[in-house]
Amino acid sequence: MTKTITYFEDLAVGQEASLSNTVTEAAITAFADISGDRNPVHVDAAYAATTLFKERIAHGMLSAAYISAVFGMKLPGPGAIYVSQTLAFKGPVKIGDTVVATVKIIELLPEKKRARFETVCTVDGKAVLTGEAQLMVPGRPEA
């Protein structure tokens, strides 16, 4: 499924887009394998039971990856390039939680064809991850 490229000139402050993903055992295992982060709070139920979370939690960066998916697939979409991202982890994400990643344009920087975004991931309407990102967005080709 190929999405049409959104050019910088098509963007407006206030535009937003979201994607939702349900965290599964398989997603956590795959993320641990790909990233090499096998912290037992993510992969060992017996260990996780001894922590303040009382059960396994997803990697915080897995939720951050869902933000990346919104940028790459929805807004701005294909062709956009990450420049920076801040992250503040506000709460745990557990197996079975549905994470809604939302990005919203808060500033456009025409001289560099960059857009600044507010980013948030929620579970059941509660923020579990917040931050800001800046992306380079391709300009419309000259005719």
Image: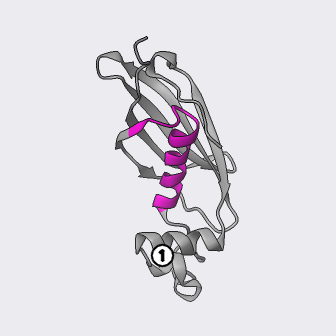
Q: Residue furthest top?
A: 143
Q: Is residue 103 visible?
A: yes
Q: Quadrant of the C terminus?
A: top left
Where, by quadrant of the figure, is residue 82 drawn? Answer: top left
* Viewer-nearest residue: 89 or 99: 99
Q: Residue furthest front?
A: 143
Q: Quadrant of the N terminus?
A: top right
Q: Inspect the magenta stretch and tell me whether residue 109 lies in it.
A: no
- Residue, x 49% and y 47% (percent of image)? 68
10 Å crowding of disc 1: few (<14), some (14-19), many (20+): few
- Residue, x 66% and y 49% (percent of image)? 20
**In the figure, 119 relative to 12: above or below?**
below
Residue 111 location (% of width, % of height)? 29, 17
Q: How many marks?
A: 1
Query: From which residue to which does the magenta span run?
Result: 60-81
Q: Inspect the magenta stretch and tell me whether residue 79 lies in it.
A: yes
**In the figure, 106 relative to 103: above or below?**
above
The image's colouring method is: one colour
The secondary element bearing badge 1 is classed as helix
Report the amino acid beneath label 1.
Answer: Asp
* Viewer-nearest residue: 131 or 116: 116
**In the figure, 75 relative to 127: above or below?**
above
Taking the image as shown, residue 113 lies to the left or right of residue 52, namely: left
Q: Is residue 90 visible?
A: no
Residue 79 location (% of width, % of height)? 45, 36
Judged by its main secondary structure, the magenta piece is helix
**In the figure, 108 relative to 37: above or below?**
above
- Residue, x 64% and y 73% (percent of image)? 25
Q: Residue furthest left?
A: 111
* Residue under label 1: 33
Residue 132 location (% of width, % of height)? 41, 38
